[in-house]
Amino acid sequence: MITVDLNADLGEGMGTDEDLLELVSSASIACGGHAGDAATIRHVLKLCKARSIQAGAHPGYPDKPRFGRFRLVMPLDQLIGQVRNQIFLVRHIAAEVDMPLSYVKLHGALANQTAEELTMAVAIFAGIQAMDPKLAVLALDNSEQVRAAKAVGVPLIREAYADRAYTAEGLLVPRSQEGAVIHDIDAVIERCLRLARDEEIVAIDGTVLKSGARSICLHGDTPGAVDLAREVRDALEGEGIKIAPAPLEMELPWASREGEGEIGIMPLGPKDPG
């Protein structure tokens, strides 16, 4: 049986959290950077616990006025500290309410930037790993986030977006461009079904992208988010697809080979010279 995780970004003040938690299998909770505070975090974590929904931290640039959707210029160590502080807050509250935290998903501009910039992604994921090596990262498939997760050795969940257009390179089309957000429910449903069954996503220019993503993001701040989530879930289950948290990929950053002891050989990436 095919299994797909449906995740939504919650605790962002949209008023739809409780309804979305009836439909998704994972909740990425805003940590106070782009949205949310201790009270909203505690509320969503308690709801997740009551409904047996997997919970994750959703840190972003500390920029509530612009919802974390613009890139800030700051020293990398300061940025890592901001991300760690946000995750620490969620972990602290999660321990208080006895609700395990399973993963971290970066938000908005920070997510897009780490999908493009390997060095930044490695630094941030290493910072997350230092806090808790059991925390997985929910990463945009076919992006530098995936390569960084493998390099650092953190558990990985590959993600795709139901209502966002893709470039031919496998990145998200910037929201400033027309067609970046897909509003047609039938088109979103077809994308989700094709991803689940065929492991494919069609880019904005018609390029067919292969994807191993087993988690689909449904944005909680999209108008009509609850109706869209319900339609997507009904369509997937109607095709016999099970909705449940995605299994973690565990891969050591060094692939050891027989006879080479514990050092091993670092596998080449697609951008490395042969």
Image (cartoon, rainbow, N blue to C red):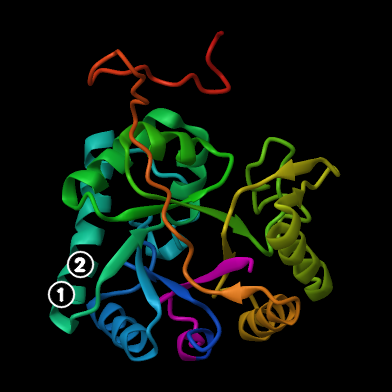
Return the residue at label 2.
91
Q: Which part of the image, by quadrant, shows the C terminus?
A: top right
Q: Amino acid at mark 1?
A: Ala
Range of magenta residues = 1-18
Judge from the rendering whether residue 58 lies leftward or rightward of residue 7; answer left or right: left
Circles 2 and 1 in contact, beta carbons < 8 Å: yes
Q: Amino acid at mark 2?
A: Arg
Q: Residues within 10 Å of mark 1 (few under 14, many from 20)?
A: few
Q: Nearer the viewer, residue 61 or 262?
A: 262
Judge from the rendering whether residue 82 lies leftward or rightward of residue 57; answer left or right: left
Which corner quadrant of the image does residue 52 belong to? bottom left
The label shown at residue 19 is: none
Q: Image height check: is 146 above or below 219?
A: above
Q: Secondary structure at mark 1?
A: helix
Q: Is residue 100 visible?
A: yes
Q: What is the x, y in percent for residue 35?
A: 38, 69
Q: Image height check: is 138 above or below 242?
A: above
Q: What is the x, y in percent for residue 223?
A: 65, 78
